[in-house]
Structure formats: structure tokens, C-alpha cells
Amino acid sequence: MATKEYADWSTRGKSELTINPDGSAKDNTGGLSKEYITQWSYGVTESFNLFVPRLFGGASQENLGEDSKSFNYLVDKGLPRSSALDFVSGIPLYWGQQPITSGPAYIGAIVFFLFILGLFLVKSKHKWWLVVGTILSLVLSWGKNFSTLTDFMIDYFPLYDKFRAVSSIQVILELCVPILAILALKKMFSTKVDVSAKLSSLKYAAGVVLGLGVLLFVFKGMFDFIGPGDDRLRMTGLEELPEMLRLDRKAVYTSDLLRSMTYVLITSVLLWFYIKGKLKTNLMVLTIGLLIVFDLVGVNLRYVNEDSFVSKRRMLEPFQPTAADKQILEDDGVFRVFDQTDGFDSAKTAYFHQSITGYHAAKPAGMQDLFDFHIYNGNLSVFNMLNVKYLVRQDEEGNSFPIENPNANGNAWFVENLKQVNSANAEIQALDSLNTKVTAVVNTNDFKNINRYNYQIDSTASISLIDYKPNHLSYTTNNPNAGVAVFSEMYYGNGWNAYIDGELTDHFRVNYVLRALKVPEGKHKVEFKFEPKVVEQGSKITLASTLLLGLILLGGIGFSFWKGKKEDKS
């Protein structure tokens, strides 16, 4: 498939720009790349996690406790018990195909059993769309493990290539399965359903689910229980730790399998007693409900417990300022900070300052490309155009200290000329050697009406930020000549509008991500306002809907009074 240039950078994904062998950039797709989308592909066999929670280890960090082989091994090797316990409290127990996971997609052994029961007992048409929804979402969650369907969806279904994890589609089956399970219970408690039909359906469902449990136990030897990160554990000098962990995975596999089968067996026996008339309906409903709660909550507490919650005070003040933070905060200007000690995905810096780092699953693709091609490589001209005034570093003793960047371009500046290129690849590559204070690069393939300009910047020319709000920026300009101003703010044409002295004016993108605007000679006020049309349209729809609902309510009340008076007269 031939490559194409970006038509709208705001719709791109993280992995769409790749580097060719010659060092050039290449655009792969109009959405996220297939490789990126399918990183979190659910394993086919791993799907049995729906029935057995830790069949594949559970989460990438599990707490095994003192009864584990790994804990005893660490203690035998001379590690203090407290250190060994701390180590096994976050051990990589997961051994499935996904890079990392916070826990299994467990819907509950009892809910799963009732779903199977519904396949035999429920006869209504609703069963079929629930079954189709369950199967389709499960198969789609396999991603690259069922590439025929996944590739078809990515290539032909609108917006499907904008999702970053195919496994998330299991939310559909997590809705469909409980609904069919409830319908199965409804039929089971109905007096209109024949007793023989209930008994035969119960027999088949119990046979299928318990038989599945037996097969999983029998074929346990087919799995190697080796995790992708086990080799790294050997680097700790504990050569036998991966083998101990493998034994723990086997033990967890067996214990959780027996746990699920026990819940299914108890539920089956209770339903059998109910069908035989030995249990009353209310007692049966209460018992099944409690069993489901014990089942699901018991698994949930492995991943969400009191350690997952913090005090209100700590929530309101999650970070404490360092000496470097306090020193930077003395500067009351508007600028950005890059903390090299904090990592690219950390949000700590943004708590105290404006930052270029942080994490979001849907971060701006243009900014991600800047990181991939320039910021990771320490391109100072990119730091300058992003108005990074302070960089935070660490000394040999681990103390953080700020370094002021005297070459930061500021919030906005006039450039002397525009360098024209005709592709997104050439635009981002031009930043390698570009003096962003003097020159800006523009992609004429996206902005076709930009002509070649050369400007003589007068020493008295100035542009200053006078008011800064997240959705409204105001500047004053003074330039004896017409010029092009570059603003150290992300370009987003689908929401931001530019105004010069209150009049709407077209602006364009330069330097791959920044905004630029032609400013006439003289003194002017320049404003950028965030005014997305979708919000305006949504507000109108909301207002119209509210008015319509009010009219309907008033009409209903009026009709009730009119009908009541009419009945009184008659």
C-alpha cells in the first residue's frame, strides 16, 4: 500500500510515523497502526479467564503472600522476611500474551454458569442477539490472534482504527452475559416452565461447565507457565526464582480452577433442590445473590482494597514541592518546565508548573511525534519553540535543581521568513536544524494559500501575552511592518479561533504543531478562543430538547386536568 501524507495531524495516532532505513519518516495509516492497536490482544485460551480468574496468573503484579514457593525460596536465600514479603506482594504472576494487565476479565463463575444455563433454558429471541454479541466481542478481543476479522474491522469499519486496545471490546460481553444469566434465572423461577425442561437444562449446563473445568485441569500440562519477563528475574542473581514463580503459577491455576468449580457445583445443587420443591423462591434468590457477591467481591478484593484508597487530604495534595519547584514558582511568568528526573510519562511536574510531559491514552499525536523524533534526542531548538524556560536535573547526590534556558522563544514571536515544505515528513525533519526564533516551517500541502514571505523584523517589533486562560489567550502586538507571529501553543483547527482586534482571522500551523498568524502592521490585540462547533451545536440541541421536554410535561399535566374535568362532568 502506498504511503500518504497527513491531511489532519489531530486525527493521527502515536505509531503512525515510523522511521525508514534512510532515517526518513513514514506515515503508515490514517488511524492507529495495526501493530499498536493489537498490542493488547486477548489470548484465545486466556478467554477462559471469564470462568477462572487467575487461569493465566491474573495481573502483572500479584500478591502471593507467605505461602508461596517464591517467598520461601527468597527466605531460604537469606533475604529478610520483610523484604521477601515486599517482593512477592508485587510479583509478575501474569504469563499471558498481553504486555501488561491490571487483572483478568472475570465475569464470575456463577454468572458464567447461568449464562450457559440460559443457552438451554431461554427460548426467546433475545437469547440470540445476546449470544451473537458475546461471541463477536470475544473474537474481536483476540485481535492479532484472529487477524482475519480484526484486519477487516480496522480496514472497513469507521473509527475502529482509533481504538488503542482491542481487548476493551469485551465490555460488550460483560453486558450480554449477565443479561442472559438473569433471563435464565427468570425462567428457572417461572411456574410456566415445565419442571422436566428445567431439570434437563440444569443437567446440560452443569455438565458443560463442570466438564470444561475438568478439561482445563487435565490439559494443565500443556501450558509452560512461563512469563515474558521471567528472564529478567535471573538478573537479580536468584537463578531459581523463575522456576519457583512457575510453580506458584501452577498452584494459582489449580486453586482458582477448583474455586470456580466449587461455586458452580454449589449453585447447581441449590437449583436442583429448588426445582424439586425443597427450597422456596425467596430463599433461593437470596442464596444465589449472596453466592454471586462472595464470588465477585472475593476476586475484586485482590485488586481493589483499602490500599487503593487514600485520605482526602492526600488526594487534594498528592505532591509536595521540591526545592527546585519552589525556586521555579518564584518566577510568575507563563512558561513551561521539563523535569528530566521525572520521566516522560509523569504528571508530577504539571501539578506545579506548565509542562510538556505527562500521560494520556489519547495524547496529541503531534506532540508524541515531537517526542519520538526530537525531544528524546535532546533537540534544544524544539525545547525553545515550546517555551521550555526551565529544565530540572539531578546532581550526584540525587538533589533536583533547575537550569534556566536563556534561549526559550517565549510565548510568541515574529519570524523573519517561512520555509515551505510539501509533506508532514519534511516538516518534522526540518526541525532538526531550524532556528525556530527566526524561521518557521509550513507544510503547503495542508495550507495551500501560504505564499513565500520574507520579513525584516524591526528591533522595536514586539508581541506580548497579556492574559492566559486555558480557553482564551490574549496578546498585544506592535510591529512597524506586517509580519507572521508564531505562538507557542498547539495548533488545533477544529476548535481554536483567532481574532485580530475582534475580527475572526484565519491562522495556520507551523513547526509541525504550533500556531501562526499573519499580523498587520501597527498595534493590535490578538486573541485565541476555544470555540468548538460541536459544543455550540450540542448546547443548541440540549436547549431545544429541554424546551421540548418541558412542553411535553406541561402538555401532559394539562391533558390530565382536562381529562379529569371531563370525567367529572360526565
Image: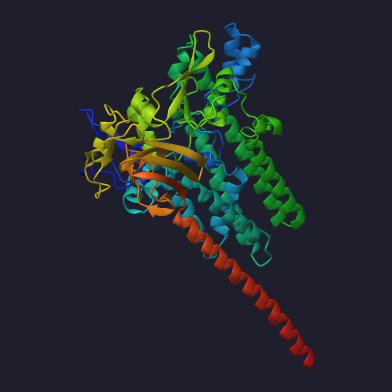
Classify 160 as above or below 64.
below
Residue 265 location (% of width, % of height): 64, 43
Residue 243 location (% of width, % of height): 49, 17
Indicate the quadrant containing the N terminus: top left, top right, bottom left or bottom right: top left
Residue 397 location (% of width, % of height): 53, 8
Apparent side of residue 230 relative to residue 269 in the rendered image (left or right): left
Indicate the quadrant containing the C terminus: top left, top right, bottom left or bottom right: bottom right
| Colour pattern | rainbow
Residue 423 occupies which quadrant of the picture? Answer: top left
User: Is residue 328 among the parts visible in the rendering?
Assistant: yes
Residue 165 location (% of width, % of height): 43, 41
Q: Which of 355 and 113 is in front in this view?
A: 355
Apparent side of residue 214 relative to residue 483 in the rendered image (left or right): right
Q: Which of 167 and 414 is in front in this view?
A: 414
Residue that extends furthest to the top in the rendered view of this protein: 78
Apparent side of residue 493 relative to residue 307 in the rendered image (left or right): left
Residue that extends furthest to the right in the rendered view of this protein: 568
Q: Which of 76 and 431 is in front in this view?
A: 431
Classify 177 as above or below 221.
below
Classify 80 as above or below 329.
above
Q: Nearer the viewer, residue 164 or 512?
A: 512
For image coordinates 60% across by 51% down, the residue present is 114
